[in-house]
């Protein structure tokens, strides 16, 4: 999943010391986030930041 974050949003996040990303789904389903102790692949979730 890619979540674009503007320079203004990044600047605000640095000033506040936090960045909140809210993930939502459509319909009655949900979001499943698995960690290394549960799920198909033994890895924890990760966040990759690419600065342009």
Image (cartoon, rainbow, N blue to C red):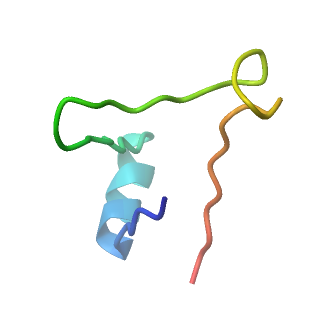
Residue drawn at x 34%, y 72% as measured from the top left = 6
Observer-nearest residue: 41 or 13? Answer: 41
In this view, 36 is above or below 2: above
Residue drawn at x 71%, y 17% as measured from the top left = 38
Q: Is residue 51 left or right of residue 31?
A: right
In this view, 39 is above or below 5: above
- Quadrant where the C terminus sits is bottom right
* Quarter holding residue 22: top left
Q: Is residue 52 left or right of residue 14?
A: right
Q: Is residue 22 left or right of residue 39?
A: left
Residue drawn at x 38%, y 63% as measured from the top left = 11
* Quarter holding residue 28: top left
Numbered marks: total: 0
Residue drawn at x 65%, y 57% as measured from the top left = 48
x%, y% of residue 8? 30, 70
Residue lying furthest right in this view? 42
Q: Is residue 27 left or right of residue 30?
A: left
Observer-nearest residue: 16 or 21? Answer: 21
Residue lying furthest left in this view? 27
Observer-nearest residue: 41 or 52? Answer: 41
x%, y% of residue 9? 32, 62
x%, y% of residue 20? 35, 41
In this view, 14 is above or below 10: above
Residue lying furthest bottom in this view? 52
């Amino acid at each position: 999943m890619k979540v674009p974050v503007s320079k203004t949003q990044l600047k605000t996040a640095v000033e506040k010391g936090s960045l909140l990303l809210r993930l939502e789904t459509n319909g009655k389903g949900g979001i499943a986030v698995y960690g290394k102790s549960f799920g198909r692949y033994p890895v924890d979730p990760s966040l990759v930041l690419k600065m342009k």
